[in-house]
Image (tube, rainbow, N blue to C red):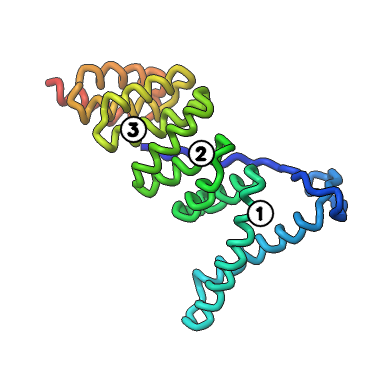
Amino acid sequence: MKKILISIFVFTVFAVGYSEETYKYLGTDGQIYTMSETQISMNQRWQRIKVMDAQISFEPDKNKLQRIHDEYQKEFAIYMEYLKKNPELLFTTGDYYFRSGRYEKAFEIFSQDDTNIKNLFGAATSARFLNDTENALKFYNAAIDKNPNFYESYLGRGIVNRNMGNYDGAISDFNKYMQYRQDESVYLGLGDTYMVSKRYVEAKNILEKGRSKFPQSNLIKEMLMRAYAKLK
């Protein structure tokens, strides 16, 4: 089953108190941007966190490692409080860890915010990758409740339901997703769910449709061959 990527690249200028001094800088796109003292301070803290993160992975000295880890925890706790006030930046930070395969850290960050649909979806998907079905369902449900048209949530919840053995729920979710988008993943999801629930005729039918739409898909081709074999 293909994993859903949730990387969304967003540049956000955050509102700050008028009492703070601001500074102008030239962005990589050639535009002039303004940053507050708080933003500069937190950006510097984030750079230190990433450096310490790398050191923790490779530091052989246990005593030095403990000192770095303690400092990392302290710095990240401060940074997290800042992130809670900036949902878009919180998403960008969670996505940084998600794309690095650090799903526990990504979930820790995404789950701090319930106001931004992307953070709800990020928490749900991180939990799914951790095989934490309880939290995956909780956050997919929250994302769907917040925005029923955020269709990626139906695909993610469908995968969770399939893995839990809730095949009717999975089929319902995949069909709901298909109302918005028909891609290789949803045909595989439906075909696989019909197969594991021994509904081989329905598996064959949906996979044949998927095969006609995605003739280059080896995954659909292989699953369709298994469906044919079951019907002999």
Q: Residue at x 63, y 61 (%)?
A: 78
In the image, residue 190 above or below residue 118: above
- Tell which of 206 and 23 is nearer to you: 23
| Residue 120 numbered mark, or none | 2
- Tell whether label 3 touches label 2 (CB within 8 Å): no
Q: Residue at x 37, y 24 (%)?
A: 174
Q: Residues within 10 Å of mark 3 (few under 14, many from 20)?
A: some
Classify mark 2: helix, strand or loop.
Answer: helix
Query: Disc 2 residue type?
Result: Leu
Distance between the alpha carbons at the discs numbered 2 and 1? 18 Å
Residue 41 x, y percent position in the rendering: 75, 61
Depth-wise, is mark 1 or mark 3 nearer the camera?
1
| Residue 219 numbered mark, or none | 3
Residue 232, quarter of the rendered image: top left
Q: Residue at x 59, y 62 (%)?
A: 76
Residue 216 x, y percent position in the rendering: 40, 27
Q: Across the whole image, how many numbered discs are drawn on residues? A: 3
Q: Quadrant of the N terminus?
A: top left
- First in residue order: circle 1 vs circle 3: 1
Distance between the alpha carbons at the discs numbered 2 and 3? 30 Å
| Residue 175 numbered mark, or none | none
Distance between the alpha carbons at the discs numbered 1 and 3? 44 Å
Classify mark 3: helix, strand or loop.
Answer: helix
- Tell whether label 3 touches label 1 (CB within 8 Å): no
Q: Residues within 10 Å of mark 2 (few under 14, many from 20)?
A: many
Residue occupied by mark 1: 82
Residue 122 x, y percent position in the rendering: 50, 42
